[in-house]
Amino acid sequence: MAKSTILIVEDDVALREMLRFLLERNGYRTMQAGDAIEAEQCIKKRIPDLILLDWMLPGMDGVEYAQKLKSHPMTLDTCIIMVTAKGEEENKIEGLDSGADDYITKPFSTNELLARIRAGIRRNKPQQTGEPITYKDISISPQAHTLNINGQLVDIGIKEFELLYLFMRKPDRVYNRTRLLDQIWGKDSYVDERTVDV
């Protein structure tokens, strides 16, 4: 069985290194980032199975970054565990409402964190985030960013690729125009709502 990949987004270098050591000792592959910009670079190389996300990051904070991750089709189903010192009830609610799938406060038990990671990966397994999807003669691979139809490589635009990938990942889901615009172009972009019409 392939190792699950966990992206650690934490600006505290000592804590990030401790998490890396803990996770690798427990059989996980890791990527590390000190802020959202570095995290984006890691995700471009490999879509993680799970993200450990600190709230208080330099630049874009963890809440804002969680919203961004959940609005992108490539990371929509990636499990996010917010790991933060903010332990008040309203902080937990804000973190979970921003898109985090779980929330654990610092200081934390490493055994509890590992259990939450296992649960998060288990919940995410049916989607196999980032894995190629094949339906009849169509195969789409988000890792390689390729589309094959009848065995032929097809050149396709970025937004069209993201739309097709979203549809193929969730074939039984119906999306309205607003939801598609938010998922593919982002909530803060200004595009005509007819952009997604065929």
Image: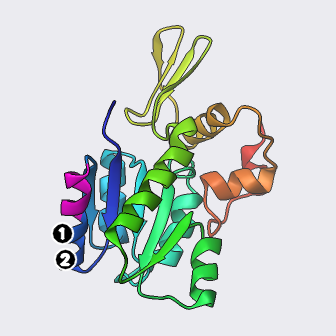
Q: Quadrant of residue 20?
A: bottom left
Q: Residue at x 47, y 48 (%)?
A: 121
Residue 141 found in image quarter:
top left
Contact, mark 1 vs mark 2 (Cβ under 8 Å): yes
* 161 relative position to 52: left or right: right
In magenta, the rendered stretch is: 20-26
Horizontal placement of 176 versus 88: left or right? Answer: right
Which quarter of the picture shows residue 52?
bottom left
Tell me the residue at 32%/68% (across/down).
Answer: 110
Quadrant position of the N terminus in the picture: top left
Q: Give the residue at mark 1.
A: 17
- Residue at image point 20% right, 70% down: 18
Task: Name the one closer to the observer, 105 or 77.
Answer: 105
What residue is shown at x 37% (from left), y 32% (from top)?
144
Nearest to the observer: residue 118 or residue 30:
118
**Which quadrant of the rendered structure holds the C terminus?**
top right
Q: To which residue does mark 2 refer?
A: 13
